[in-house]
Image: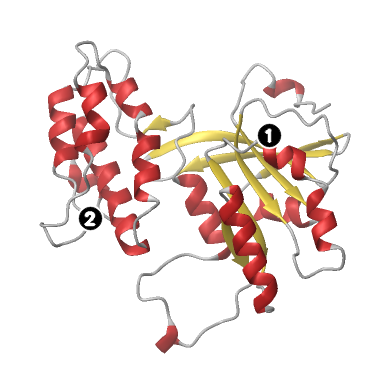
Amino acid sequence: MLVIPRNFITMNLPRLLIISTEKGKASEIASNIGGEKLSNQDHFEYHLWNIQNKYYKTQILICVTEIPTPDIPIDNVEALIVYHDPQAENAEQNLKEWSCLITSLAEAEVLLFSCNFITDGGVKDKVIKWCLQNRFELIELNRPDVDASEADPENNKYGIERIIEALHAHMWPNMILKGKPSDGEEQSPNIDEVEEQFDNIELSQDSTETLPMENMLDGIMGEENADFGELFCQLRAMKEHAALLPTNQRRIAAEQLVTAFWKAMGGDPSEMED
């Protein structure tokens, strides 16, 4: 049974679960993304991750294990990272031992499949197929260096940096938005203003290409008692829509989505500039 350190039981922190078919890799990932080790209990290792970015701050409990037991609870698990070496001997059997847990977490918001760079084309095709079938994003670690002339023109992140980026993009239930008014000053955002901001979201510098958010918002915007919390819940549908876009458009859509929320809350757009 998964045991949470006593001083974190009442905090009810959302969890990131990292599992690995290779010894030491799950713990390594937890440390590399910024987790601070708390304790070892039974077959589990716990890390506390304090996330601080320009949009919000939050605390995440990272649970790490390499033992595929059938009774791992999935309560409060918001994200799952699987580390696996698909080029190792008995690779398919090693991954199959985790199949029940992976299936039980199929509805988690963030599903990441990490491994070292895959050199075998046939193996890579199988991994990509598995990731597509199970809704995982493939993230290869230790990618070989490339010449400057071959650098990614879209500045996409890879390896640990991409893992951090994906987890930062998640809407953790306990996150505190930066710039949010204090309890005494907090005001309800204007729904009309929020709708106006989403209507104006663009995918690129070309103003003729706009993200069709209107249909996604019609239901909630039509409700007389709609509030910001309900609107916030609609982000899942918007994220699913954005996931179908090309990489460069997906990144711009995400940035402008955050900007729209920030403006709707009364934030100063200049504060979001790098």
Quadrant placement of the N terminus: top right
Residue 193 location (% of width, % of height): 13, 29
Residue under the point 30% across and 26% down: 231
Residue 55 location (% of width, % of height): 36, 41
Q: Amino acid at mark 1?
A: Ser
Residue under the point 63% across and 67% down: 141
Residue under the point 80% across and 26% down: 3
- 55 lies left or right of 225: right
Q: CA distance from mark 1 to mark 2?
A: 34 Å
Residue 233 visible in the picture? yes
Q: Which of 37 and 261 lies nearest the eye of the viewer?
A: 261
Residue 111 location (% of width, % of height): 58, 46
Q: Which mark is residue 203?
A: 2
- 103 lies left or right of 269: right
**Mark 1 closeness class: few <14, some 14–19, many ≥20 residues within 10 Å:** few
Which dot, 1 or 2, sits closer to the camera?
Answer: 1
Residue under the point 68% across and 39% down: 103
User: Dot 1 corresponds to which residue?
Assistant: 104
Q: Amino acid at mark 2?
A: Leu
Quadrant placement of the C terminus: bottom left
Q: Which of 101 and 65 lies nearest the eye of the viewer?
A: 101
**Mark 2 closeness class: few <14, some 14–19, many ≥20 residues within 10 Å:** many
In the structure shown, which secondary structural element does the residue marked by tag 1 occupy? helix
Please determine whether, in this image, residue 22 is positioned above or below residue 167. Answer: below
